[in-house]
Each structure stands twice: as C-alpha cells, then as structure tokens.
Image (cartoon, rainbow, N blue to C red):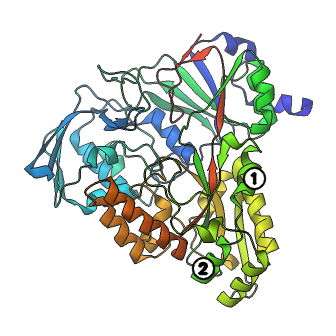
C-alpha cells in the first residue's frame, strides 16, 4: 500500500489538504476510465454517466420511473395518438453558445434511433420526424406509440442525449470527437487513464418547476468543478476516500465495505435499486458459438451462485440466482423455460451435449476487462467453467477501453477476434423488451454479438402492441422461452453494488451517478 501512495498522489490535481477544504470541487472515482466520450458509440455505463454531465435529454425519469419533460416544455398528442408535437423550453443553449433548436433534436434523435433498441422500435412506428420551427418538432406515426416519452427519457445504455445538429449528423457508426452538449457541465481537461475534468456550464437553464428526482426535475448545480480520478486498484481508492483525498467512490469493493462502514466520515449506500444483471455474451458470427447447440449446452454448466458470490460475496442480500432474461422483482420476470439454466449441474452431460453439437476443440477467446473488479470476477468463474467442460479457452485480459474496442470486431479469433465476454446491464435495461439489447435478434444490425433470431424480433414487435400488462406478460414468457432456445445471452445472476462517499457530500440522487443537486460542505 505504501508503494502506491506516490502514484496516487501524482494523479491528484492539487494537494489533498487544499482540496478537502474546497467545497466547490468534487473528486469522484468512477468504475473505470471513460475511454469513449460519444454517448451513442458505446453501451458502457461509464460513457452514459459521463454523458449526463455534458448533455441533456428531452425527458427524464423520476424516482417512480415515470417520464417527465426535461428539455421539453411539454407535448401535444393528436390524431388518436399518431401525432406528437414536442415544444422545447426557452433559453436552452449549447456549450458553444448556440441555442438549442428543434432541428438539433431531430438530428440527435435520428442518430440515436439508428443505434438504440428502443429507438429502433420508435422509428419503425414513425413515418415522419420534422422540425416545425426553432422550438417545436413533430412525430407523425403510422400507429400509436404511447411509450414515446419513455423512449425519449430512457436512462439506460444508449440514452437519447441532444447534441448540435452539425455533430448529430455524424454517422451513428462513427464516434463524435467534438464533445458539445447543453448539460449542466462542460468537458474540460482530460488525461486518458488518469483524470477527466468537468466544469460548470453557467449557461445551463434548469427546469423552473418540480423536484429533483432521478434524471427528472431541476438540475441545479452547486459545484464549480467535478474531477473523475481513475483508480483501478480498490485498496488505493478506499485509502483515498478515507483520507479525504477523494469525495465519492462510485463502486466500492464488497470486501472493503466493513472498513468503510467503520469510518464515521463515510456513508455507504446503494444507487441502483433495481441492481445489475451479469451476463455472458457470445459472438454468434464465429465458431464455436455460431452453433446454437453449443450455446444451449453452456446453459447446463452455469451456476449463478458461483458468479454472484465471486462479485459480492456470500451476503444473500446482495445477489439473486435463478435469474432469467428479465429483472427479478419486475412485472415481466418469470421462471418460464429456465430449467436448463437453473436445474442441477451435470458437467458430464454438458460435455456430451457439446460433443453432440459438433464442438471439436476449436479455440475460443474470452476477452476480460481486468480493470473492472466485478467483470474480472465473473470472467474468472466463467473461464474455470469453460475449462471444466473441456473447451479450449484462451483468456485475454485487457483494460475496459480496449475491450470496448476489441469486441466490435467481427473477425475470427485467428485475426484478433473474440468468442465471448462477460458484462452487465442495469436492472432497468432488463425490465422489458423495449431497451433490452441482449434480447435483440436482428443480426448484424444489432448489438455486439449479432444474434440472428427472427422469432425474437417478431415477439418483441408484438410486445409493443400488447394492449395491457397481462398481454405483455404472456408475450415475455414466450420471449424468455425463445431466448433459452436461441441463447443470445446467458444471465449469470442479479447483484447490487454499493457506492461510498464522504459524509460532507449530500444531495446524491438515486439511479445513475449524477452531479446536479450535489453539495459539498
């Protein structure tokens, strides 16, 4: 530990004693470095969290997960739900001084709709999206889409953040390199792998009404500067938090929680009340997991308890097993067709099923984000599982930023491709088919892994048209059964992570790590 202290000190922007007294600067340790700054180009939560400082959204979600106008002043629905006219609040400006116009929103939403699962459903129902003037734009739909505000206010994975039209016209498959938003903070100094700085945007106009709640309500800033300090080593982050050299640690390691809780100057809480779903994602384009029989055989080798205990320990309050493709505790979760995943483990049977499916020892490459502890933990359990069932596994440990780049490759493993990786989604991501990337079956037009399942797509489309919750539940049971047959993903359990901050930091809202409403005394 002593040897790490000089390295940590070198990463700090000013002497710790001076920073501890500065109530206008907050120092935050994120889950990982934000290697992708374009919020649409990556599904990583760290990119989304970064984006909430820099960008704003037309709608937000309150603590009851109901959409509320945010940049939007409001909307008018006509023509039996087929026409939505949205009006912007006055006075909104981008960080470059330009006003936010309806044309910026139209371009931003079109770019988002090309990337996001919920957005794709919305645009499939959209005949026309046009700016009517500087403050109004209109959706003309081919059928009613009552979930439109929920789509524009979604908080998970690829969020429909608004950027200037000139940037939003960038192809959705290409990263935007100029980071200009209209959010409460503007991007400042960035040292990759060490520090990212956000400075308060004095031109930001909060909503004049409502109460701050999740991503809805007034986004009032009380901090002049937010510094994200990258500390991959948990012991270093814990020591810095206890010493007051940082103010907030996004994801405190489970084995360090007893020490943190004993410190009267530190508070430990849970941000994401719906938890996270860990899952295994296959490359459906390349051997061996382009073979559905191989994918199905893997289900019988998974012990969700092993994965969850590796992440958060044996405290049963912090994890759940027997988890399907929808978040436990939400209306669409069920036990439909889960027997292959949740039944007794028989590794001899799994080996026989692999052989019967045609697996003959092809090398599989598991890419591992070694700098994110809970991903590393899942991957270690998974690698052992693959070895025990006789698969020829090549584990390649990389930093998270490199994993994000590497997993976009569709090349075979002989040309620096990949076969599988472990990752996670938020509980809200997995609560319905709307934004559930892991359940898309739209092939190379879909999310990384590229499963092709026309039946999953058909069922998803029918879910959007379901008239009530009972009909939705019936369809999602069929979706889960189809997912157990096609295996676009393998859920490995639900877990809950804790965040830790100094007690002189207050006003932290639940949901995502947000920095409006936060004060430091």
**Which residue is at a point 8% across and 51% down the rendered structure image?**
79
- Residue where numbered disc 1 is placed: 377
Number of on-image labels: 2
**Which residue is at a point 52% across and 51% down the rendered structure image?**
327
On the image, the x and y values in percent for residue 211 come to 37, 21
Quadrant of the rendering where the C terminus is positioned? top right
Quarter location, residue 414: bottom right
Q: Is residue 471 above or below residue 298?
A: above
Does 323 sit left or right of 172 as displayed?
A: right
In-front residue for pair 216/395: 216
Does 403 sit left or right of 214 as displayed?
A: right
Quarter location, residue 278: bottom right
Confirm whether residue 72 shows in the render. yes
Query: Real-space Cα distance between discs 1 and 2?
Result: 25 Å
Q: Earlier in the sequence, mark 1 or mark 2?
A: 2
Q: Is residue 92 above or below residue 128?
A: above
- Residue where numbered disc 2 is placed: 286
In-front residue for pair 17/475: 475
- Work out which residue is located at the far right of the displayed protein and give it: 2
Give the structural element (helix, strand or loop) at label 2: loop
On the image, the x and y values in percent for residue 277 come to 58, 52
Dot 2 surroundings within 10 Å: few (below 14), some, or many (20 or more)? Answer: some
């Amino acid at each position: 530990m002593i040897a790490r202290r000089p390295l940590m000190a070198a990463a700090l922007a000013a002497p710790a004693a001076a920073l501890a007294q500065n109530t206008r600067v907050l120092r935050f340790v994120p889950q990982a470095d934000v290697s992708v700054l374009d919020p649409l180009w990556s599904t990583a939560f760290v990119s989304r969290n970064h984006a909430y400082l820099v960008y704003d959204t037309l709608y937000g979600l309150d603590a009851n997960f109901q959409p509320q106008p945010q940049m939007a002043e409001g909307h008018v629905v006509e023509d039996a739900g087929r026409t939505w006219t949205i009006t912007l609040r006055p006075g909104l400006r981008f960080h470059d001084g330009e006003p936010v116009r309806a044309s910026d929103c139209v371009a931003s939403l079109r770019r988002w709709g090309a990337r996001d699962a919920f957005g794709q459903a919305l645009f499939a129902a959209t005949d026309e999206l046009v700016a009517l003037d500087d403050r109004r734009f209109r959706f003309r739909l081919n059928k009613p889409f009552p979930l439109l505000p929920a789509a524009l206010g979604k908080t998970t994975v690829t969020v429909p953040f608004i950027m200037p039209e000139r940037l939003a016209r960038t192809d959705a498959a290409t990263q935007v390199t100029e980071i200009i938003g209209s959010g409460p903070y503007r991007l400042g100094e960035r040292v990759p792998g060490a520090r990212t700085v956000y400075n308060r945007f004095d031109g930001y106009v909060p909503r004049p009404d409502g109460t701050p709640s999740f991503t809805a309500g007034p986004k009032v800033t009380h901090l002049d500067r937010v510094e994200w300090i990258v500390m991959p080593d948990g012991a270093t982050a814990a020591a810095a938090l206890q010493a007051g050299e940082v103010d907030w640690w996004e994801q405190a390691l489970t084995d360090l929680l007893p020490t943190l809780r004993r410190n009267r100057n530190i508070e430990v809480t849970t941000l994401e009340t719906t938890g996270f779903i860990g899952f295994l994602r296959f490359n459906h384009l390349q051997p061996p997991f382009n073979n559905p029989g191989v994918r199905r055989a893997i289900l019988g080798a998974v012990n969700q308890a092993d994965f969850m205990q590796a992440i958060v320990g044996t405290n049963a309050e912090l994890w759940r097993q027997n988890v399907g493709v929808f978040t436990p505790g939400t209306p669409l979760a069920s036990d439909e067709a889960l027997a292959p995943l949740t039944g007794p483990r028989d590794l001899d049977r799994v080996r026989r099923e692999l052989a019967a499916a045609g697996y003959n020892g092809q090398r599989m490459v598991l890419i591992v984000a070694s700098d994110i502890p809970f991903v590393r933990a899942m991957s270690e359990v998974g690698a052992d599982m693959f070895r025990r069932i006789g698969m020829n596994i090549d584990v390649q440990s990389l930093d998270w930023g490199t994993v994000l780049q590497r997993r976009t490759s569709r090349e075979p493993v002989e040309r620096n491709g990949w076969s599988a990786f472990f990752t996670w989604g938020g509980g809200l991501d997995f609560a319905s088919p709307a934004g559930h990337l892991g359940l898309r079956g739209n092939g190379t037009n879909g999310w990384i892994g590229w499963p092709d399942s026309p039946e999953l797509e058909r069922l998803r489309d029918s879910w959007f048209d379901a008239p009530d919750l009972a009909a939705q539940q019936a369809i999602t049971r069929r979706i889960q059964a189809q997912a157990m047959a096609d295996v676009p993903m393998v859920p490995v359990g639900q877990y809950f992570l804790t965040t830790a901050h100094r007690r002189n930091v207050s006003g932290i809202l639940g949901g995502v790590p947000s920095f409006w409403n936060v004060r430091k005394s």
